Image (spheres, rainbow, N blue to C red):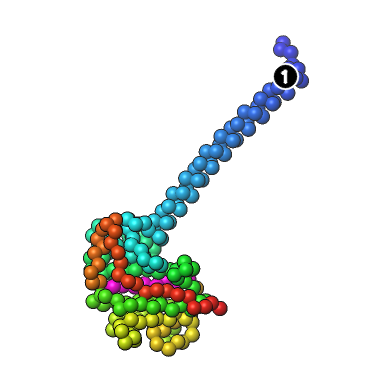
Amino acid sequence: MALPASPSVLLYRLDRLRVELGAWIAHTANIGLFIGVALVLGIGSSWYMIEVGTRLTTLRQGPWAAWTNAGTADVDPYTRAHFARRGSLPVSGSIALTLEARHDQDGQRLHSSCEYLLEAAPLEASWWSLAVYDAHGLLIQNVADRYAFTSESYAPNPNGSFYVVLARDARPGNWLPVGGAGRLTLLLTLVEPRGVQYDDPTAGTTLPQLPVIRRIGCR
């Protein structure tokens, strides 16, 4: 008949079991942490590629970004996902340049609680349009039924330059209402921009001179 283990032996076995259990928990926690970090990095990088893009998919000038493969036969998955998330169909990249701006010149997020002044030199394109959207990619409803300006509907300065004001309340001249939409996105489309070659974003291609977006003030 086996003799019962002494108290010291029992304590030794319990201590060893505690050490082994602690090591197993630590190992499991490390695996969970690794998986969590991998998921965060994977989701974060995918979000960045879809929302912001890289120099392989976009061209940038100040707050403006152009998705150069939009509407082309060889469109990449990130560009496709970018426009699918917005629920919009881009103009073919072979004939037009579509640019987005979500921030002002100081890097602040565009918001309807602020007023902005866009100043632009003459836009060298066969046709262009400038529209403002809410955070869901929808045009902003307003009593003035004013949603965009085009090369055929804006009021230019004598030298061909122009300005556009984004504000809640009516302003003289080229005014686009933003109501209480919250976060804003500007969309500038240049059809057949003159002197622009943007088929290869890695070749150091420069964009034409684009509107400057200055914040006037906020409520």
Q: Quadrant of the N terminus?
A: top right
* Residue 212 drawn in magenta: no
Question: Which picture quadrant has residue 154?
Answer: bottom left
User: For the point 52% across and 78% down, which residue is it?
Assistant: 217
User: For the point 39% across and 63% down, which residue is it?
Assistant: 85
Magenta segment's dominant SS is strand
* Residue 189 drawn in magenta: yes
Q: Is residue 56 above or below residue 138?
A: above
Q: Is residue 104 above or below residue 115?
A: above
User: For the point 42% across and 56% down, which residue is it?
Assistant: 48
Foreground residue, 161 or 56? 161
User: For the point 33% across and 62% down, which residue is it?
Assistant: 59
Q: Residue furthest bottom?
A: 172
Q: Residue furthest front?
A: 159
Residue under label 1: 9
Q: Residue furthest top?
A: 1
Residue type of the residue flagged with mark 1? Val
Asked if one can make out residue 136 in the rendered structure from this viewpoint, the answer is no
Foreground residue, 152 or 75? 152
Read off the magenta span. 183-191
User: How far across and down, in percent of the image, does residue 203 sit?
Assistant: 27, 57
User: How far across and down, in percent of the image, does residue 137 sit?
Assistant: 40, 70
Asked if one can make out residue 208 in the rendered structure from this viewpoint, the answer is yes
